[in-house]
Amino acid sequence: MRIARLLALLGVCAAVVPGQAAFAQHGLGSVVRTIERAQKNFDIADKNGDGLLSREEAEQGPVPFIRAHFDAIDRAHRGLVSKQDVAAYVRSLQKRPATAQPARAASASS
């Protein structure tokens, strides 16, 4: 489920992903469609067309991931998020380790 959300959010990252047609040629057409849909949803939510989503626009628009993570995405605390802000947030999620590695046991040396 988390992967599906991240893929949906990648849609707003399309502005920073060149060559979407190449993805379609390599069997990643569904990823491209997801990106295009999420990008379109961002634009639909952006009621004033300034390329930024306010908290109010996010709450009223079809962008549930942005709505749920608005404060984390808005790292500058300006009350607005851009597609680039969302892309940076998604990249930060991808860099986190999925699970913490258990600590190694100390070897018993005599």
Image (cartoon, rainbow, N blue to C red):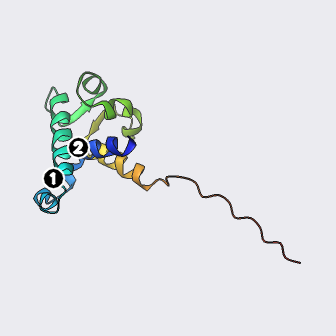
User: Where residue 103 sits in the image (x, y, percent)?
Assistant: 68, 60
How dense is the environment of label 1, judged by Cα within 10 Å: few (below 14), some, or many (20 and up)?
some
Distance from Cα at disc 2 to Cα at disc 1: 16 Å
User: Where residue 88 sits in the image (x, y, percent)?
Assistant: 34, 49
Which one is in front in this view, the residue at disc 2 or the one at disc 1? 1
How dense is the environment of label 2, judged by Cα within 10 Å: few (below 14), some, or many (20 and up)?
many
Which image quarter holds the C terminus? bottom right
User: Where residue 13 sits in the image (x, y, percent)?
Assistant: 24, 48
Taking the spot 18% from the left edge, 34% from the top edge, the residue there is 41
Q: In this image, 4 relative to 47: left or right? A: right
Taking the spot 27% from the left edge, 42% from the top edge, the residue there is 8
Q: Which mark is residue 12?
A: 2
Q: Is residue 14 above or below residue 101?
A: above
The kind of residue on which mark 1 rests is Gly
Taking the spot 37% from the left edge, 39% from the top edge, the residue there is 73
Q: Is residue 69 above or below residue 105?
A: above
The kind of residue on which mark 2 rests is Val
Q: Which residue is mark 1?
A: 29
- Asked whether disc 2 touches disc 1, contact meaning CB atoms under 8 Å apart, the reply is no
* Closer to us: 7 or 84: 7
Q: In this image, 14 relative to 103: left or right? A: left
Q: Earlier in the sequence, mark 2 or mark 1?
A: 2
* Closer to us: 2 or 71: 2
- Tag 1, which secondary structure? helix
